[in-house]
Amino acid sequence: MEKIAVKEEWRQRALITAEEYQAWYRRSVEDPDGFWAEHGKRIDWMKPFTKVKNTSFAPDVSIKWFEDGTLNVSANCIDRHLEERGDAVAILWEGDNPAESRKITYRELHENVCRMANVLKSRGVKRGDRVTIYMPMIPESAFAMLACARIGAIHSVVFGGFSPDSLANRIEDARSSVLITADEGLRGGRKVPLKKNADKAIEIAGKAGQKVETVLMIRRTGGDVGFAEGRDLWWHEARETVEATCAPEEMGAEDPLFILYTSGSTGKPKGVLHTSGGYLVWASITHHYIFDYRPGEIYWCAADIGWVTGHTYILYGPLANGATTVMFEGIPNYPDASRLWQVVDKHKVNIIYMAPTAIRALMGAGDSFVTSTSRESLRQLGTVGEPINPEAWLWYYRVVGDERCPIVDTYWQTETGGTLITPLPGVTDLKPGSATLPFFGVQPQLVDSEGTVLEGATSGNLCIVDSWPGQMRTVYGDHERFVQTYFSTYKGKYFTGDGCRRDEDGYYWITGRVDDVINVSGHRMGTAEVESALVSHPAVAEAAVVGYPHDLKGQGIYCYVTLLDGEEPTDELKKSLIAHVREEIGPIASPDKIQFAPGLPKTRSGKIMRRILRKIAEDDFGALGDTSTLADPTVVEDLVEHRQNRR
Ligand code: WTA
């Protein structure tokens, strides 16, 4: 594979040299206390910490950073910039409609966040309370998150594309009695019925015993939505009734900042809990060095605030660093496939960070959508969320970046708070498809399935052997699940769930999940969640779901469905199943392929052999391996004969 060496122009503007990277990295793992004592000071503390690292992965799992320090995250993201940059733009909002944009300065951000904090307080919200946020991509989403941080409430953002059921589950699990939402969202010219969904979710949660007492509503489209007297209130009205300042609450470094639900191999989505001090240090330092951010630059992370990428790299990292962060309400192909690059030209964007799935889709639309724009303001590109194939990487590099801009392929997870493995621009030589080398303080290790540590150029399961400040602290309300999920497969190590190759230069190449998690267009999903949605359909007896390679989405969702006796396997029923899954989880979980299967391959003890199902879904049934342990080997023939994915 070709290597793209650091160019002289990149090296000249880099924050550190390649030698410094080596030296800093070495110190960060040999003397983490010293390294992080120094870098922990990049944020403002109300009471400085005296302890730095206090972490253990075994026998007990306990993770604390900067534990005796106190701070307020919103003050770090807003107040401390007011003197120097009060009139600089904090949030540069680009609407779904190309004619709409808004600029929110740090001073305006301060006022809005304080007012929203005061509105929440007026409804009795206090430290430690959980506030659910179900919002479109509008600046008020940022106000809401920062308002929570200001008063010490814990936000739980639920992606606006999730269904009422998914929202209800998250409200229940977080035991949240406050919801912030909007009348409707707007994406690609289409309305998203947020308040309507929220009303349904509140009803479902209510039946399960979780009452929502306050709904703060933002008016976005002006659409006609219900209003529950005593429970609902409009932001544009409430904001006028409260004061424009609100003192930031003094929080402990280990006080929770937010919960964000994410999918795993088993069970319902887990509430990943991040705390205040370590998370903010990690968000800020990674944003600074990975994007080589300089004051005054326009930085755009084209993710949704409902995912961790939006939390860390639209909101907390950039604002902690006093950046101008772009927030985009729309989608890359509306009004046409030129939109992102038009926005780049309109706002003179310097740095853009996006998902490989969008890059592949835009690559498919043709180069002219890109080359018809200037993009001369761009100096750096980034990707996140899934492995990027070298072809898409090279297209991004050549066509979008005109071979001028280094690409940072950043590997990380909801659980890790921020990036773990990434090149640093002007420092690291690039290889298309590789996330390259670990960030400061991150110690990757590859192990085989028995847990034996593998050295040198090899492939294995990716673990991280010691803690870093941005690491999640627990699963909300279920520490045992945290320990079981991440630290029990390989005792004493954090297991990422990803497979990975390390090459002769020590570069890491993430190969994708090795557990029952699939990554569809950069959205993470548990196959078990889709299965449970399918079996809740009245015609279904049993279902097994696997991922399969998909040109645009990275992975597609392939469902094997066994019907109840008497049900007819028709195309109509397929449609009904797809609609049902969308309804249960949300459109992002739409099945791509459904195969009606009279039986599923099971061992004699009744365990579904997913390895076989994956192979058939990949259209690679020549390599099914040993099927002799199956209870009924003939089911495999039927599955192969009726497979839905033929390459
Ligand atoms: C995958 C998103 C390859 C990986 C920040 C991980 C990646 C999962 C990359 C986490 C990358 C993320 N290269 N794979 N640069 N970035 N992944 O929690 O499988 O939504 O475990 O966090 O995405 O997804 P999550």
Image (cartoon, rainbow, N blue to C red):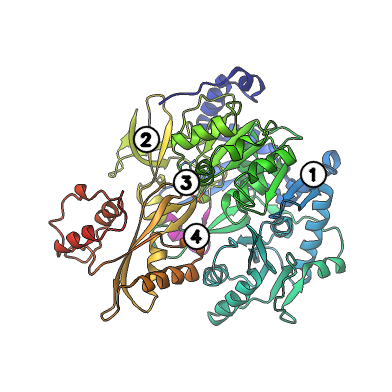
Q: Residue at x 71, y 66 (%)?
A: 126
Mark 3 and mark 4 in contact (Cβ < 8 Å)? no
- The Cα atoms of the two marked residues, 1 and 4, are separated by 33 Å
Which callout, 4 or 3, points at the residue further toward the start of the chain? 3
> Can you give x and y, in whole percent of width and height, for residue 593 in the image?
36, 60
Q: In the drawing, what numbered circle is on residue 501?
A: 2
- The Cα atoms of the two marked residues, 4 and 3, are separated by 36 Å
> Can you give x and y, in whole percent of width and height, for residue 286 in the image?
60, 38
Nearer to us in this view, 590 or 129 = 590
Report whether residue 645 is seen: yes
Asked if the residue at label 3 sits under 8 Å from ligand 1, the reply is: no
Range of residues picked out in magenta: 473-483
Q: Residues within 10 Å of mark 4 (few under 14, many from 20)?
A: some
Mark 2 and mark 1 in contact (Cβ < 8 Å)? no
Residue 239 lies, with reference to residue 313, above or below; the image says below
Identify residue type, mark 2. Arg
Q: Residues within 10 Å of mark 3 (few under 14, many from 20)?
A: some
Q: Secondary structure at mark 3?
A: strand
Q: Which residue is mark 1?
A: 89
120 in the magenta segment: no
Residue 237 lies, with reference to residue 156, above or below; the image says below
Q: Which residue is mark 3?
A: 56
Quadrant showing the N terminus:
top left
Nearer to us in this view, 99 or 112 = 99
> Can you give x and y, in whole percent of width and height, for residue 321 in the image?
71, 40
Identify residue type, mark 4. Ile
Mark 4 and mark 2 in contact (Cβ < 8 Å)? no
Q: Which residue is mark 4?
A: 588
Which callout, 3 or 2, points at the residue further toward the start of the chain? 3
